[in-house]
Amino acid sequence: MSKSQETFNKKEREKKRQKKQQDKLEKMQERKNNKEKGKSLDDMIAYLDENGNLTSVPPDPRKKKVFRQEEMQISIPKQEERPANEKRTGVVSFFNDHKGFGFINDSLTKERIFVHVNELSIAIKENDKVTFEVQNSPKGPVALNVELVKP
């Protein structure tokens, strides 16, 4: 008599495959039985409340907010013009010698202003106190004529 060609591993794989197939058939049957649930329009509608959260109940009309189109601003707000050639003081918060740029924190407005190595009269490093002029650029304020403040 010859020995069976099926090994233990083959039998286990076949059992797993049949189990998977059975589970798949059960899930399919369950979906068919429950397909009528949740089909009404009321079950599918979602509402936004006054805070912008999704809810299943309609919002209270008394809490409705009306916005006028003229009052809405979609663009970047205009920056107020700064006086030209006004000397300001600040502290260098970051400067990278290798890349040649950094940032200065303005003492008055607490604004972070970009500075490039071409605008320096002397080498600066972090935590140095400096005086400078501010000019607006397309990307924001830029420091010009940067000089160290002598202690």
Image (cartoon, rainbow, N blue to C red):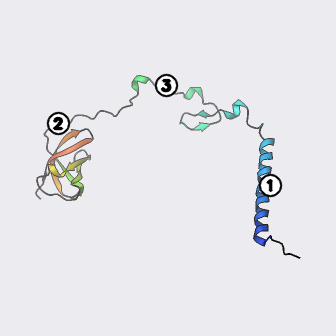
Q: Nearer the viewer, residue 77 or 49?
A: 77
N-terminal of the pair, mark 1 or mark 2, is 1
- Could you tell me which residue is drawn at 77 percent across and 68 percent down? 10
Depicted 121 relative to depicted 50: above or below: below
Q: Nearer the viewer, residue 73 or 38?
A: 38
The furthest residue to the right: 1
Amino acid type at image mark 1: Gln
Q: Residues within 10 Å of mark 3 (few under 14, many from 20)?
A: few
Q: Is residue 87 left or right of residue 72?
A: left
Q: Residues within 10 Å of mark 2 (few under 14, many from 20)?
A: few
N-terminal of the pair, mark 2 or mark 3, is 3
Read off the residue under disc 3: 66
Read off the residue under disc 2: 83
Q: Is residue 64 left or right of residue 100?
A: right
What is the quadrant of the N terminus in the image?
A: bottom right
Q: Position of residue 36 (x, y in %)?
A: 78, 36
Circle 1 sits in a helix, a strand or a loop, which is it? helix
- Could you tell me which residue is drawn at 75 percent across and 65 percent down? 13
